[in-house]
Amino acid sequence: MTKIPRPFTHIDTWVFDLDNTLYPHHVNLWQQVDARIGEFVGSYLHVSAEEARRIQKDYYRRYGTTMRGMMTEHGVRADDFLAYVHQIDHSPLQPNPAMGAAIAKLPGRKLILTNGSTDHADAVLARLGIGSHFEAVFDIIAAELEPKPAPQTYQKFLGLHGVDPQKSAMFEDLARNLVVPHQLGMTTVLVVPDGIKEVVREDWELEGRDAAHVDYVTDDLTGFLQRLV
């Protein structure tokens, strides 16, 4: 049976993930965060870099974020974790006026839904030069430290911002984070690497582009948005 993707004609709210979605995977900004997370885990648990890496990725898969795993298993304070891992160099990000113009033309509201912090989101949006187009950022603190893909996180987001999922679209780089949005009625878009430049991702992070809960797949978010308006 052919999958018929949901349309965009009825959309009045546009929801975007942040990292590896609003900027290309190959910028590898998240690689810096990833390295900082490994350092934090190793230092906190007094284990080798190799063991820290194993724990980091295990918690990421099982809990949605390494931070959630560290909080649950070891009592880590979220503030300490976030403050450390987001001390990165945002300079690899370049302004993207074309994306900003495309986002500005989308009819309705634009919101950010991220497992990162608002401080990190603000820094990313400022470097891209697109922050003025977004009404609000819903971050891991607003989610009460429960990351995507937890169903309650999406419900909190929808409730806080008065969003009707049946009239919303969600853009994400992880297919698993689109399962619940699709179930709720959102039109879903998976943003993937362009296949040309090298990216640092786990194999499972790149899976799911053929999944039933993914309506559209793009390796060029700016171009995709331009074609919508």
Image (cartoon, rainbow, N blue to C red):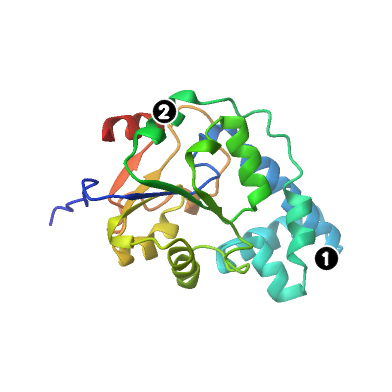
Tell me which amino acid carries mark 1: Leu
Mark 1 or mark 2: name the one nearer the start of the chain.
1
Instruction: Name the side, left or right, on which 225 lies relative to 8.
Output: right
Which of the two discs, 1 and 2, sits closer to the camera? 2
* Residue 159 image position (x, y, % from top left): 44, 68
- Quarter of the image with the N terminus in it: bottom left
- Compared with 144, 5 (above or below) is above
Can you tell which quarter of the image residue 68 is in? bottom right
Residue 220, visible in the rendered structure = no
- The picture places residue 192, in percent across and down from the top left corner, at 42, 41
Query: 32 or 17, which lies in front?
Result: 17
Q: Nearer the viewer, residue 67 or 138?
A: 138
| Residue 181 sits in quarter | bottom left
Across and down, in percent, residue 84 comes to 79, 51
Local secondary structure at mark 2? helix
Label disc, if present, on residue 101 of the rendered structure: 2
Which residue shows up at 63% across the image and 67% down it?
145
Left or right relative to 154: residue 27: right
Mark number, residue 45? 1
User: In 3D space, how far apart are the residues under numbered discs 1 and 2 (Cα atoms)?
Assistant: 46 Å
Q: Residue at x 43, y 64 (%)?
A: 158
Q: Which of 130 and 3 is in front in this view?
A: 130
Give the class, few, some or many, for how many residues have Cα within 10 Å of label 2's Cα (few <14, many ≥20). Answer: some
